[in-house]
Amino acid sequence: MPNELENKELIEKLPKEGVHCYPANPSKITRNRVLSVIFCILGIFLALIGLLKVSDNIIKIGLLVVGCISTIISILVFAQSFLIAKFRVAVDYNEKNVVLRYRYSKIAIPFENFDGRDGSPDQAEAIIDKNFKKDATFYLVLDDVFEDACYQTSSSDLESVDDFKQLREECFAIAEAYGARNSKDKVKFYYEKDNEGKDTGSTDLDALVEEAKAEQKADEEAEAKRRAEEQAAREAEEANETSEESEESSEEKADEE
C-alpha cells in the first residue's frame, strides 16, 4: 500500500505489541453445544434405526445418510464452540493483523489493507432484532479493502456490548491510521459506487425518469383543469336552463291572470 495513505502520527498512537482477543457470546456458545449434542444423538439414533430396524434398502440408505450427516455436522459445531470461546475476533498488534474466525478458518486482515466501519443487519437479522431482542444490536464490518469479500460481526456475537465497543474503537483507529479505505485501488461495493456518483448512463436514465414524471404530472394537471372547465360549463348551462324555465313559468302565470 502506498505510504502516503498512512498517518504516521496516528500509527504511533496505536499499541506496539500485544493481542486483544474478543470471545464469542457465552449464551451462543452454550446454545450451540446443547443443540449439537441433541442433533448428534438424533443422528446416531436415525442411523441405528436404519441399520437395525429397517429392511427396505432405499429407506435404510436414506436414514443412514441423514443420520451420519447430522452427526458429523453436530460434532463440527460442538468443536467450533471451543474455538470461538477463545476468540471470535482478535486484534494482533504483534503481527499487525485483525483476525477473525470463520468456521474453522482464521482470516487475518493486515492493518494496511483493513477498513472498519459500522454495519447493518440483513433482512432476517432485522426481523429478529425488531421482534425478539429487547436490547439494540450493533454491527461492525471488518473489511479487507483489496478483496471482494468482507465480514461482519455484531454486539450479540461477542461476549459483551463493552467488548464490541472496544473492538469498534480499535478497528476505527486502525482504519484511520493506515488509510486503506482511501486507496483508489480498493474494491468498491455497490453502495459506495452510488455515493461517489453515478455513471453517465445512470444519470441519463434518472433524467429520463424525472422528465417522464414531470410530463405525466403536467398531463394530469391539464386533464384536471379541462374537467373543471367542463364541469363549470355544465353548471352554467344548467343554471341558464333553470333561469329560462323560471321565466317561462312566470310568463305563463301572467298570461293566465
Image (cartoon, helix red, strand yellow):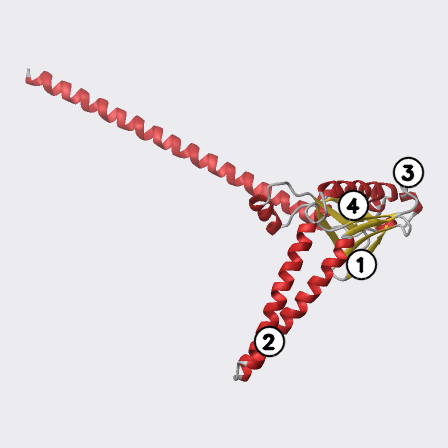
- Observer-side mark, 1 or 2, equals 2
Quarter location, residue 163:
top right
At which x and y percent is residue 181?
82, 45
Q: Residue at x 18, y 20 (%)?
A: 247
Disc 3 marks which residue? 13
Q: Residue furthest left?
A: 257
Number of residues whose C-alpha sits closer than 10 Å to that of mark 1, classed few (under 14), some (14–19) or many (20 or more):
few
Work out how far the residue at label 3 is from the one at label 4, CA to CA, in angstroms.
17 Å
Question: What residue would you read off at disc 4?
Answer: 116
Residue type, mark 1 in image: Lys
Which amino acid type is marked by label 3? Answer: Lys
What residue does disc 1 label? 106
* Camera-nearest residue between 202 and 60: 60
Precedes in sequence: disc 1 or disc 2 = 2
Label 2 environment density (alpha carbons within 10 Å; few <14, some 14–19, many ≥20): many
Q: Secondary structure at mark 2?
A: helix
